[in-house]
Amino acid sequence: MLFETVVLLLPFTLSLARPPPIIDDASPPRATVYSGCKVNNTVALTFDDGPYIHMNNISDMLTNASAKGTFFVNGHNYDCIYDKKVAARVQYAYEQGHQIAAHTWSHPDLSSLNMTEMADEFTKINDALLKVLGIKTPFMRPPYGSYNNLVRQVAYQMNQSLVVWDLDSGDSVGATLQESEGNYTMAIASRPANILALNHETVKTTAASLVPFAINALQNAGYQLVTVADCLGLDAYSYQADQVGTWDKSWFCPEDEDGDDN
């Protein structure tokens, strides 16, 4: 399966000079790209590539620390989001008040796709989030942080903004736990107004050790740990049903021949 790599920023660094969101008035219209938070004294801890086996533990650690996180999830990357156990994970995090947003269906480099292929990646994960959680998300993260004007055009058509990051823990590109902790320590020492941090819930050491380290270090530095939506001062969802979805036989990944429901 695919892991994130960094294409927008050098690994292990915090971007201190943050440009405002990119809004291009040229035709055709393109989605806004957020590369950092806007609300002072906030940190958005984000977790990519799930829903994976560590999702519940990460959710619990955040909740127990009175913190919130944001999970950018795939439809069929490590697991099929429609499998009962996998759907239960994302529902668990959502019901704890963490934000759930889109990370494409199968984790491709969107900039390598044509418009039809790209729209399919957006539509399938958005449909899954509507079925499983009863939500429509206005936020998506392109895999690898890779996007071009066509990606922004399709995102705009889907009523979504792109969210990248200004701090990379480095967990998906071979950083040791100590190096990832060092990235947070250096970022905190520079005392930015806010931080939008990239992590991966698929990395065992991130779930077991980096998350509690980051929570403790950031809170001790006086930051509020909030969702991406809260750190941007925006709504987390453009639609929310009264309750999450209930599994049925229509929940299956098209790549799975027999609609496995394990």
Image (tube, helix red, strand yellow):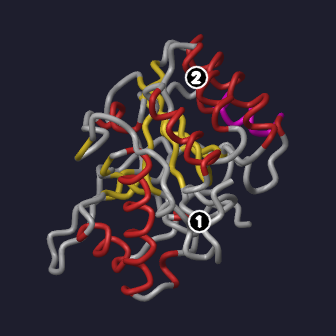
Q: What element carries label 1?
A: loop
Residue 209 in which image quadrant: top right
Marks 2 and 1, how far apart at CA: 28 Å
Q: Residue at x 31, y 57 (%)?
A: 161
In the displayed structure image, the side of residue 177 where residue 8 appears, left or right: left
Q: What kind of element bears circle 2?
A: helix
Closer-to-camera residue (207/249): 249
Which residue is denoted by mark 1 in the rendering? 7
Q: Is residue 216 left or right of residue 163?
A: right
In the image, is residue 169 part of the stretch drawn in magenta? Answer: no
In the rendered view of the protein, which quadrant contains the N terminus? bottom right
Q: Is the magenta stretch mostly helix, strand or loop?
A: helix
Which label number is shown at residue 138?
A: none
Residue shown at the point (44%, 55%) measured from the top left: 102
Q: Where is residue 153 in the image (x, y as percent from the top left)?
A: 28, 75
Residue 5 in view here: no
* View extreme (front): residue: 249
Q: How far across and how far down the image is residue 196, in percent?
A: 48, 39
Q: What stretch is highlighted in magenta?
A: 178-186
Task: Decide whether residue 183 is among the magenta residues.
Answer: yes
The answer to which of marks 2 and 1 sits earlier in the sequence is 1
Circle 2 packing at 10 Å, graded few (<14), some (14-19), many (20+), is: many
59 versus 153 height, above or below: above
Circle 1 crowding by C-alpha within 10 Å: few under 14, some 14–19, many from 20: few
Q: Looking at the rendering, which quadrant does residue 63 occupy?
A: top right
- Residue 2, given in percent of the width and then of the height, sits at 70, 66
Which amino acid lies under the numbered mark 2 shown in the image of this protein?
Leu
* Mark in the foreground, 2 or 1: 2
Q: Which kind of residue does numbered mark 1 sit on?
A: Val
Residue receiving disc 2: 62
Q: Residue at x 71, y 38 (%)?
A: 54
Give the residue at x 48% y 18%.
Answer: 223
